[in-house]
Image (spheres, rainbow, N blue to C red):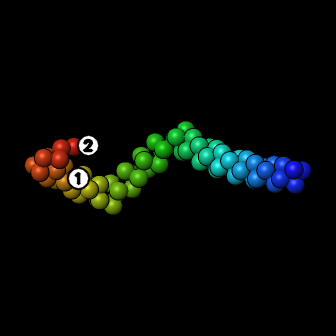
Amino acid sequence: KLIASLAEGDAALAERRQQLAVEEQKLARWKAENVRRKHNYLPFLINLLKVLAEKQQLVPLIDAAKERQKQRAAAGGGAK
């Protein structure tokens, strides 16, 4: 009986350790997501737009995006 009880306890312990590892991984993913969510991307985006404008790539990108949007609207997809 004692050996069977120990085996059950070991199995339960292994299962709890596995659950703990899963929860720790989940917590790490949430932490990384929160960092991304709280980061201020505005300076990066403004600088990106400035660089694209300096290289005369901004207007063609905007025109291409407008064209894709028109094509989607004409195909019935609409803008998302």
Horizontally, residue 28 falls left or right of residue 17, namely: left
- C-alpha span from label 2 to label 1: 13 Å
Disc 2 crowd rating (10 Å Cα; few below 14, some 14-19, many 20+) is: few
Residue beneath the point at 29% across and 54% down: 58
Using a 10 Å C-alpha cutoff, classify the residue at mark 1 as few (fewer than 14 neighbours), some (14 to 19) or many (20 or more): few
Residue 27, image x, y percentages? 64, 44
In the rendered image, residue 76, in percent from the top left (x then y), is placed at 12, 46
Residue 4 shows in the view: yes
Q: Which of 21 and 64 is in front in this view?
A: 21
Q: Amino acid under label 2? A: Lys
Q: Identify the secondary structure beneath mark 1.
A: helix
| 39 with respect to 42 (left or right) | right
Q: How many marks?
A: 2
Residue nearest the viewer, comparing 57 with 37 = 37
Residue under pointer 1: 65
**Who's the residue at 55% across and 44% down the image?**
33
Sequence-wise, the earlier of marks 2 and 1 is 1
Q: Position of residue 41 (x, y in %)?
A: 48, 44
Residue tagged 2: 80
Residue drawn 23% across and 52% down? 65
**29 relative to 21 in the view: left or right:** left
